[in-house]
């Protein structure tokens, strides 16, 4: 029988589970337990034993940030577990190690990352992380490529899409909150009143709404690869030189450009929010570092994807039998695939920049700016660039488009 854990009940409820007890050591009644979940959905406990510390994450049967008026199935923990296992295979060392999974309790016990902290907090504080763009670019390329028919045989891929097909509730959140709600006055939306005229203009922009619906159609029906599904700066934990990706509870099959597009949007929102967080002497240096991370994500994605194309193209798509074995280069095909990925990624990037300012779930980059006039000015730059990205996503060079638009709007 499922029951939500509390700091008081956790040790007696899970103290007898061998992999957890062995890892932590000591008498469970002496474990120190702290609930630290500050995300939108789940309970997260740090459990300290005599030998080690572990994280216990448990799904609640409702959306934590809203309350029990919004029920949400516990089965999401099963898909999060599936995703963690697949990500660990597809990019070893990139995600926390899973210690134990309990489907009935919707509970995952995993490695405690220390002294890592959430990337979003680091970016607000103006901290830098060595190798960040390299790590994230490779993570996106490896998981995109190795979860697709470029790497997998048709039967294996279809079976895995089948495994994920029972997850309807989580994709429905993204379909509404990310792709749809920003573009009309949906019930749970909220935004800074300073933005009212711009919001009216965006919601009257038919070309923008058509593009968002086209992207939603692709998101809902395109099963190119298993995506993380919520790869923002709150889903990355770092020290000053090591990064890990966490929280794939929004994982599903979707477009290969989804994760990298959402990730870049979150770097851009950090970029646009910086004037409120940095002294002007440090501002351009730090924005330069953020832009360099975005550029590195793009170039590393392309390099790693190309390396995998050349060395691991073992799946159903673009087999060597049709290309290299016949004396034909497959490079034009690679370019076409990459063009499609960046077309999708630029579009997703734009709508993520919109939904974090207009829909239900906002981000701390902007929300922590107390002066609403100042916040509105920075949010407006972000919204306008998001629109340009969506409408100019076809045939654009991603690095060039992002750099040009970001510097144009940063100077307004
Ligand atoms: C109701 S869930 C709101 C948001 O939180 C998650 O982190 C996802 O980004 C989702 O869209
Ligand atoms: Mg999350």
Image (cartoon, helix red, strand yellow):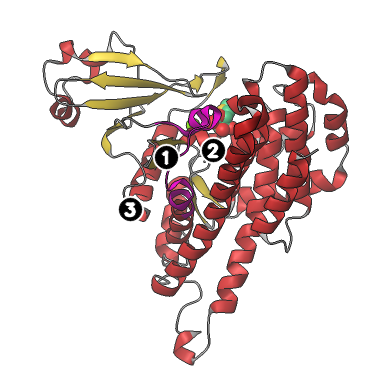
Residue 271: x and y in percent read 63, 38
Q: What's the magenta bit mostly, secondary-structure-wise?
A: helix
| Labels 1 and 2: the sequence-earlier one | 1
Q: What residue did someone put label 3 on?
A: 89
Q: Residue at x 81, y 26 (%)?
A: 195
Highlighted range, magenta: 117-137
Q: Quadrant of residue 155?
A: bottom left
Is residue 166 toward the left or the right of residue 294 in the image? Answer: left
Per the rendering, the mark at residue 243 is: none
Whether the residue carrying mark 2 lies under 8 Å from ligand 1 is answered with yes
Pointer 1: what residue? 79
Which residue is at the front of the view, 293 or 26?
A: 293
Please name the residue shown 78% across and 28% down the image: 377
* Disc 1 versus disc 2: nearer the observer: 2
Which residue carries the number 2 mark? 232
Between the residue at mark 1 and the residue at mark 2, the CA separation in whole angstroms equals 18 Å
Picture quarter with the C terminus: top right
The magenta stretch spans residue 119:
yes
Q: Residues within 10 Å of mark 2 (few under 14, many from 20)?
A: many
Position of residue 144 in the picture relative to residue 400 (left or right): left
Circle 1 crowding by C-alpha within 10 Å: few under 14, some 14–19, many from 20: many
372 up-or-down from 232: above or below: above
Is residue 170 covered in magenta?
A: no
Q: Position of residue 248 (x, y in %)?
A: 45, 39
Q: Are marks 1 and 2 in contact (CB under 8 Å)?
A: no
Residue pushed farthest front?
Answer: 281
């Amino acid at each position: 029988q499922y029951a939500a854990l509390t700091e008081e009940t956790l040790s007696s409820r899970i103290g007898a589970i061998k992999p957890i007890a062995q890892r932590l050591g000591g008498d469970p009644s002496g474990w120190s337990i702290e609930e630290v979940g500050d995300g939108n959905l789940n309970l997260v406990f740090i459990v300290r034993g005599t030998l080690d510390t572990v994280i216990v994450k448990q799904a609640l049967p409702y959306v934590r940030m809203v309350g029990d008026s919004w029920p949400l199935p516990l089965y999401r923990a099963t898909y999060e577990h599936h995703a963690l296992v697949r990500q660990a295979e597809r990019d070893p060392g990139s995600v926390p190690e899973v210690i134990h999974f309990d489907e009935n309790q919707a509970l995952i016990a995993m490695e405690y990352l220390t002294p890592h902290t959430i990337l979003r907090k680091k970016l607000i504080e103006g901290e830098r992380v060595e190798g960040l763009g390299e790590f994230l670019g490779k993570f996106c390329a490896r998981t995109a490529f190795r979860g697709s028919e470029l790497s997998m045989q048709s039967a294996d891929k279809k079976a895995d899409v089948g495994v994920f097909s029972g997850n309807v509730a989580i994709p429905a959140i993204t379909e509404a909150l990310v792709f749809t709600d920003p573009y009309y006055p949906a019930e749970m939306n909220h935004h800074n009143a300073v933005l009212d005229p711009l919001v009216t203009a965006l919601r009257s922009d038919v070309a923008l709404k058509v593009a968002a619906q086209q992207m939603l159609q692709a998101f809902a029906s395109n099963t190119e690869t298993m995506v993380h599904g919520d790869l923002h700066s709150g889903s990355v934990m770092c020290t000053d030189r090591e990064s890990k990706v966490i929280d794939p509870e929004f994982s599903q099959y979707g477009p290969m450009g989804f994760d990298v597009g959402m990730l870049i949007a979150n770097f851009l929102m950090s970029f646009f929010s910086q004037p409120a967080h940095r002294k002007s002497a440090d501002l351009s240096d730090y924005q330069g570092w953020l832009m360099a991370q975005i550029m590195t994500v793009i170039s590393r994605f392309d390099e790693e994807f190309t390396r995998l194309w050349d060395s691991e193209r073992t799946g159903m798509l673009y087999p060597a039998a049709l290309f290299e074995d016949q004396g034909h280069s497959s490079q034009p095909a690679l370019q076409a695939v990459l063009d499609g990925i960046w077309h999708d990624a630029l579009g997703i990037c734009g709508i993520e920049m919109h939904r974090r300012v207009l829909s239900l779930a906002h981000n701390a980059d902007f929300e922590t700016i107390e002066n609403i006039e100042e916040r509105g000015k920075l949010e407006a730059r972000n919204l306008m660039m998001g629109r340009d990205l969506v409408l100019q996503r076809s045939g654009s060079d991603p690095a060039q488009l992002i750099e040009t638009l970001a510097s144009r709007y940063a100077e307004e």
